[in-house]
Amino acid sequence: MKRKSVITVIALLGIAAAFFFILQNNKKKNQAELDIVAETNTEIAVKTAKAQKESISGVFRVNGTFLPKTQAQVSPELGGQLVRLFVEEGSEVKAGQTIAKISGDKINVNVNNAQANLDNAVSSLNRYEEAFKSGGVTAMQLDQAKLQVQNAMAQLESAQLNSGDTNVKSKIDGIVNKKLVEVGTVVGAGTGIVEVVDISSLKLKVEVDQNLVSQLSIGDTVQVVPSVTGESLEGEITFIAPASNGALKFSVEITLDNSERKIKAGMDGIAVFNSAGMNDVLTVPREAFVGSISDNKVFVVRDNKAVLTQIQSGVNYGDKVQVTGGLTEGDVVVTSGQINLIDNAGVKVIQ
């Protein structure tokens, strides 16, 4: 009986050992399969394009934003309570037109006080002149009385000038774009009451690459296409920035007539410039750039690896960008999938 128990234990141990051996083999097999999958998955799928030389048309387009001819806040020269507002949002105003009125109660008090001081000074002067004839006052006292009259007259003139400033007038032609305060509000001198915008003409502001800005001049005619109408309009370059914005781009403003007010300030449009064309220009697609074009970084595929490369970019032609350094013709750059890449990551090119 005891011998049977020993045999049973030995048999159970054998079975357990067999199961352990099988599990270990399965574990090694599974791990090997996982290693193969992991090795396969290290290659990130990307799309690519080649850097190539081509002839570029002299026409290039730049997006921009329309700015108003003038824009200003109308404010009072003196502080006080706003008692009247003669315009509403959307009202047309002319330069010099009264658009609001400030309470003149305190100002009128100042005028009355200045008038009273002048009357007293004149009365005193009359008495001093009579007294001087009889020797009752000295010549110096008489001169002081005359000086007091002059000072009182100057104070009255100042108070009277200020009394006219209760009328708040617009300094420019335009349309009331925004009402900034309500009637009854106490405002300080220089506090905006309404905002007036003149859009009888507009300025399309664009940022032009350094390689193109040298071909532009003040007075050049440029075609402008507002996004809202799609109609090609003629504009004139009225400003070229003397310094870049730090990304080798220069602000250029193109002024165009907008007397029909079809275009509003803040809308976007496209400036179509016409410059000399160029041959044998090395370009890559705009999508190849990691981040913005100004960062000048692309992934170049070499030996199935994506190598993050610093380059020098030139003219931005919209969907293509000129490369002036860092790449040679035929170099393969990643155009899709960069978000999954790090430097020297393995890649698999897909169509």
Image: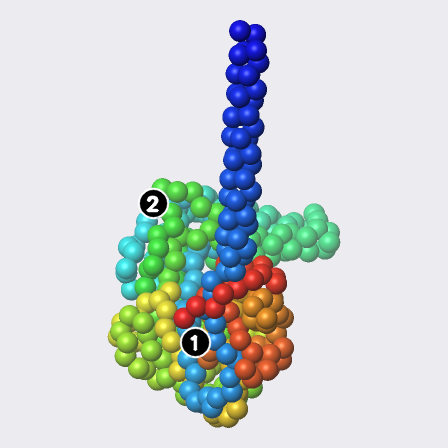
Which callout, 1 or 2, points at the residue further toward the start of the chain? 2
Q: Quadrant of residue 5?
A: top right
Q: Could you tell me how far apart the alpha carbons at marks 1 and 2 are, in whole angstroms? A: 53 Å
What residue is shown with label 1? Answer: 319
From what the image shows, is residue 323 above or below residue 89? below
Q: What residue type is labelled 1?
A: Asp
From what the image shows, is residue 189 above or below residue 20? below
From what the image shows, is residue 178 above or below residue 288? above
Residue found farthest to the top: 1
Q: Quadrant of the C terminus?
A: bottom left
Residue for point 36% across, 42% down: 184
What residue is shown with label 2? Answer: 183
From what the image shows, is residue 236 above or below residue 299? below
Find numbered disc 2 in the image and state the secondary structure of the residue it sits on: loop
Q: Which amino acid does label 2 sit on?
A: Val
Q: Are marks 1 and 2 in contact (CB under 8 Å)?
A: no
The crowding category of the residue bearing disc 1, from other C-alpha atoms within 10 Å (few below 14, some 14 to 19, many at least 20), is few
Percent from the top left, x then y, of residue 11? 53, 21
Q: Is residue 242 visible from the viewing direction of this image?
A: no
Residue for point 59% across, 74% down: 248
